[in-house]
Image (cartoon, rainbow, N blue to C red):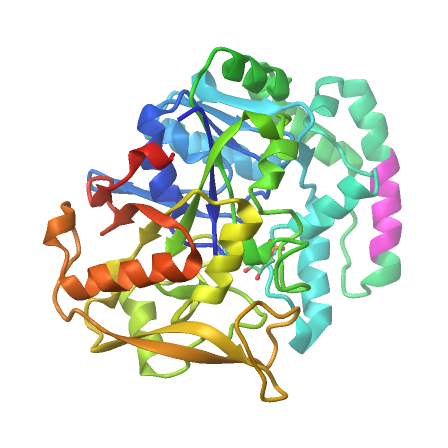
Amino acid sequence: MGCLIIVGTQWGDEGKGKVVDLLTESADAVVRYQGGNNAGHTVMFGNKTYILHMIPSGILRETTSILANGVVIDLSELVKEINDLKKMGIDVDKYIRISDRAHLVMPWHKEIDQLREKKRGKSKIGTTGRGIGPAYEDKAGREGIRFGDLLDHEKLRTRLIELVKEKNIFFKNNFDTFQKLFSAEDIFYEYVEYIKKLESCIIDTPSLINKLIEEGKNILFEGAQGTFLDMDHGTYPFVTSSNTLSGNACIGSGIGPTSIKSVLGIVKAYTTRVGNGPFPTELLDNDGKILQSEGNEYGATTGRPRRCGWFDALLVRQAVRLNGINSIALTKLDVLDGFETLKIAIAYRLPNGEEYDNLPRSLENVKPVYLEMPGWKCPTAGAVKYDQLPDEMLAYIDKICELVGAKVSIISTGPKREETIVLNPDQF
Ligand code: IMP
């Protein structure tokens, strides 16, 4: 395996959590390198379902789990997640490592995120309201607080006093509906309490990761969100505030690109999106409702219903290119079990009537051109062997691979670990 990056190829929620959990069996460490608790990775095994927002899914298999420099962390939420995992009997302290360069999501970031969304009205982005955008803004604006700063209490207190003064003025000037003021002292004492329990986990993670690489260990880099929520390559401005592409695994964890062995793209057999923004294959009819209910398409972080639509081959082909994907893991095919006919978008009709088989700069107002394929109309959930799969499903899988330009290496037939068919393990 060496260093393997796992990325979402659509708008997130492709089923990365399950695949990461599965491959962690052969991993020595799992690294989160971007995003924050806007993510929600669902993992199911035994009779239990776990939803992780910050901590890499690897923790469930008691594997070294690293929150690298590229993530933004809401400390109070992280402490809650750690406590929940401890209650389940997982020795979190032994396995979790947090970068001293990772930035904090501060209470004002969450407030700004939510107040801005209210102000945007109809043109709101539909963020998760977790303060992710404002935290990355302060990072880029060199106004952020990093985990390493929490270790020097006196400096932290001075920094908080300066920042809180500025932020309180900012709120007064920009959001007249926001009445409360932040208190540097309250935040200081709250954070010092949290950090007492975490101090030994805050380390120089690039050194740890590079040491593991030198020792020839297997490392999984767990992407959050999906390709088209990427700040540069996604459906801007309806994106998240980090780079979700595989290239950012290097920057976000402090390793060189030559260390990466392969990239596995997670592809849902249809398309979903949470929040606002263009979605050419969205289904607003009964078929969309069926995908939503059969696929249990509700956000793991906010509980919002996900918008659902047909598979879009143009999007995933672009994701294969942008991420340098070697092979794909196809998830949730069983959700399509009941359909007579399936549709795959193979081109877009632009507003001027022109047909275009590449991704235009904007996906607003494009109409998908569909290829139709017969459905398999039989239950496939839980299949564990390739030859158990119906011919129509195999044809659908082959067509997807041909259109997106990547081999399939994993087929997921249900949410549980064992509901998986591994085809080409040499690909990752
Ligand atoms: P933010 O990341 O909270 O700023 O939200 C920006 C956009 O990304 C919104 O449309 C969110 O719904 C979407 N988003 C953020 N995280 C996830 C995720 O983990 N899965 C799917 N969508 C996400």
Q: Is residue 243 left or right of residue 318?
A: right
- Inspect the magenta stretch and tell me whether residue 179 lies in it: no
Residue 163 part of the magenta-drawn span = yes
Q: Which residue is drawn at 55% across and 25% down?
A: 259
Residue 296 in sight here: no
User: How far across and how far down the image is residue 204, in percent?
Assistant: 64, 17
Q: How many marks?
A: 0
83 over 138 or under it: above or below: above
Is 264 positioned to the left or the right of 61 in the image?
Answer: right
- Can residue 222 be seen here? The reply is yes
Residue drawn at point x = 35 percent, y = 41 percent: 19
Image quarter (top left, top right, bottom left or bottom right) of the N terminus: top left
Q: Which residue is drawn at 37% across and 83% down?
A: 285
Q: Could you tell me residue 77's position as x and y percent?
A: 54, 39
| Residue depicted at x 75% and y 33% | 145
Q: Does 71 sit above or below residue 397?
A: above
Q: Could you say where residue 15 lies in the image, as x and y percent from the top left?
A: 37, 50
By secondary structure, the bulk of the magenta-drawn segment is best described as: helix
Q: Is residue 324 above or below residue 55?
A: below
The range drawn in magenta is 162-171
Where ligand 1 lies, by quadrant? bottom right
Image quadrant in which the C terminus is located: top left
Q: Compare residues 418 and 396 and report the one nearer the observer.
A: 396
- Relative placement, left or right, of 84 versus 212 is left
Tell me residue 401's x, y (percent). Answer: 36, 56
